[in-house]
Image (cartoon, helix red, strand yellow):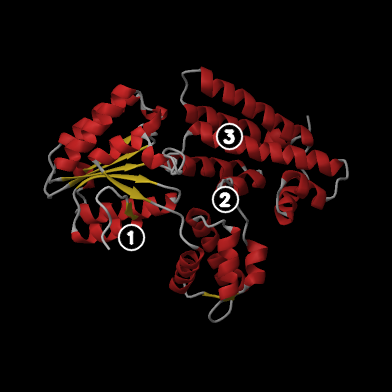
Amino acid sequence: MPAKPDAPMSAETFSAAVKQGICGAFVFFGEEDYLKTICREKAFRAVMSEGMDVFNFFPISFSPASGTREAAMEKLFDAVNAVPVMQDKKLVVITDLAPAALPKDLLENLCQALASAARSDDTVLILECRADELVADYKLEASTVYKKLAACAKMVRFDLLTRGKLIAWAKRCFREEAVILSDEAAGLLCDLCAGRMLALSGEIQKLVCYAKYVKGGTPPALDDKDVREIVCASAPDEIPFAMLTAAQSWRLSEMLEAMDTAREQREEPIVVLAKLSRIYLDMLFIKTASENRMPPSEIAKALKMKDFRVGKYLASIAKVPISVIENAVRLSYETDKRLKSLPSDPWVLLDKLIVEIYAPKSLRVP
């Protein structure tokens, strides 16, 4: 049955609408951020002619690193009012914006821009809210902010996929790479990734590389033992795989690459720093506990962490002096104070932090 007019669209409904040709304003919200990216890319391909994105694609970021919210709002109105060049439509994508945190006047301005795009026959506007920017809990649809947004745009909700759909998606990804994955291994993989497509996509890439270039076979095949050995388990609020792996590598180049990825994905610098701080605090606890001869199983229990994850931490810090880890915690704290008090570029502060921690001299015993 068709959805009620005031009910949010699903990711599947939005994807189907894109194929038929869409126009208007859309607000992406919900827990599955990876699917939002997929749907945004579908909209981009549907709207944009080759080479015309320089004229007709308007990415508007409300991140503090991009300027003030007022300046971003001006850019948004300019984008909505712009005339498409050499094609029928233009695409406007708004990111790094938590609508509920906006002052009343800026929220009203945002709604005006959405309403203007909704009335237009040449504009596709997507307000892409990450899971933490518009929390999809039981109170959301009754909130004033949601009602304001829904009054001037079509709401698109991205829920986490069911386990069955995740398994089917994972197996399809492996089939496309000509790698065989057993049903048991597919289920285990989805469970270790805590039902998150972003984590799952990264682990799939790892497993495909392992199957093709390490394990081999014609065709290469993976079972649940391979998944247990290769996959890094995560929780719904877990540190992104790339950042955790880079931090544990103790290589400057890998950490700077992880920072570049976070920047490209428009993560808030303060959130990135919080994730890094958590990694270093876990390292410090595990290192201290290990030096005091606490068994890995007890460490895992104390941190509510999987045994094999503790093992990975122990391997990564085995040759790292505890003073280096203490220094990383101290530098993270000082960077946090600077981020919250100084008018500096937050990404510059984060890059400086990484260099101070991971430059080769920082690994020497003081």
Q: Nearer the viewer, mark 2 or mark 1?
A: 1
Which of the two residues, 30 or 23, is positioned nearer the viewer here?
30
Q: Earlier in the sequence, mark 1 or mark 3?
A: 1
Report x, y in % for residue 245.
61, 49
Residue that mark 3 sits on: 274
Q: Residue at x 59, y 30 (%)?
A: 353
Residue that mark 1 sits on: 12
State the separation of the CA atoms marked 1 and 3.
Answer: 33 Å
Which of the two residues, 108 or 346, is positioned nearer the viewer here?
108
Q: Nearer the viewer, mark 1 or mark 3?
A: 1
State the separation of the CA atoms marked 3 and 2.
Answer: 15 Å
Residue that mark 2 sits on: 241
Image quadrant in which the N terminus is located: bottom left
Amino acid on which the number 3 mark rests in the picture: Ala
Which of the two residues, 315 or 39, is positioned nearer the viewer here?
39
Bin the neighbour count of mark 1 within 10 Å (Cα to Cα): few under 14, some 14-19, many 20 and up: some
